[in-house]
Image: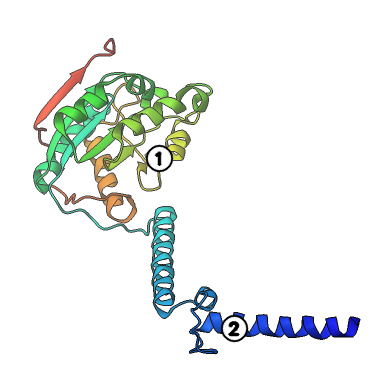
Amino acid sequence: MKKHYIHLWALLATAFCIFAVASAFDMPEIAGHTLRSSGIADALRPSAEATVDTSAEAEADSLLLAEMDAMAVAASAEPVFPMPVDTASQTILFIGDSMLEGLGPRMAAYADKNGHTLYNVTWYSSTSEVWGQSDKLRGYISRLNPTYIFISLGANELFVKNIAEKRRKFVENIIADIDTIPYLWIGPPNWKDDTGINDLIAEITPRGAFFLSNGMHFDRSSDGAHPTRSSAALWLDSVMRWMPQNALHPIRMDVPDVQKSKPKKQFIHQPSER
């Protein structure tokens, strides 16, 4: 009896398999009846169109990832020096302490020679702390719309103790105020060893945005600190010779035919101002 049941179950299983296969692949007719597809084959076998779409999406994703990788590499890559010299006419804002008395007239001569417009801002006895706490730089940027900024600060901070701790945020504030405008910070003309102001500025600014003046020879005025006017002119000449090969944002600065000139406008601030 059990043997008959086994044969019966085998026949039923075989019939089920036949109908399942037939319904999956649209068999023509069986016993006068047309079987409709169950869709199993379509579900298991992707269509040619779907294959093309998947391939196109994969290619688009691959291109997007490659572009993102390229952008990430470009953002993190070190600039290759020398950088291209910008030969366009610039609107230059030159800010700093009393060192601008010597540097400013020579900078004006360079501006005249190269088709730039120069605005000098001298804030006597000023420091990175004074500028970094003030809104003056932001005000001048908003008012004059400079395309390039020169800075001469640090001479009044040569001997500040714990300078990295005391001045870091102010140097960072100045750089933040400048934002994306190309700039060059001209370091102070040391007459004695400093306590770290040059190292601090060099650390915070990117390569090519800081000119180290310490170690150069200067003829000094009677106070023993400020370079004479002729020595200050030579100082700026050194900056301009350094610029094409070493600056992060070099601009056209051919040597002028005259020793000095005047900026389009000179702004003066006294030590007591804030």
In the rendered image, residue 107, in percent from the top left (x then y), is placed at: 18, 38
Q: Is residue 146 above or below residue 169?
A: below
Residue at the disc numbered 1: 205
In the rendered image, residue 254, in percent from the top left (x then y), is placed at: 16, 51
Q: Quadrant of residue 201?
A: top left
| Marks 2/1: CA–CA distance | 74 Å
**Three-letter amino acid code at disc 1?**
Thr
**Considering the image in quadrants, where does the N terminus appear?**
bottom right
Q: Quadrant of residue 24?
A: bottom right
In the rendered image, residue 213, in percent from the top left (x then y), is placed at: 37, 39
Q: Secondary structure at mark 2?
A: helix
- Position of residue 91 in the picture relative to residue 214 (left or right): left
**Three-letter amino acid code at disc 2?**
Val
Residue at the disc numbered 2: 21
Q: Is residue 257 above or below residue 59?
A: above
Q: Nearer the viewer, residue 242 or 250?
A: 250
Q: Earlier in the sequence, mark 2 or mark 1?
A: 2
**Considering the image in quadrants, where does the C terminus appear?**
top left
- Position of residue 6 in the picture relative to residue 262 (left or right): right
Q: Nearer the viewer, residue 40 or 119?
A: 40
Q: Nearer the viewer, residue 13 or 244?
A: 13
Picture colour scheme: rainbow
- Position of residue 73 in the picture relative to residue 5 (left or right): left
- Residue with the most extreme top position: 272
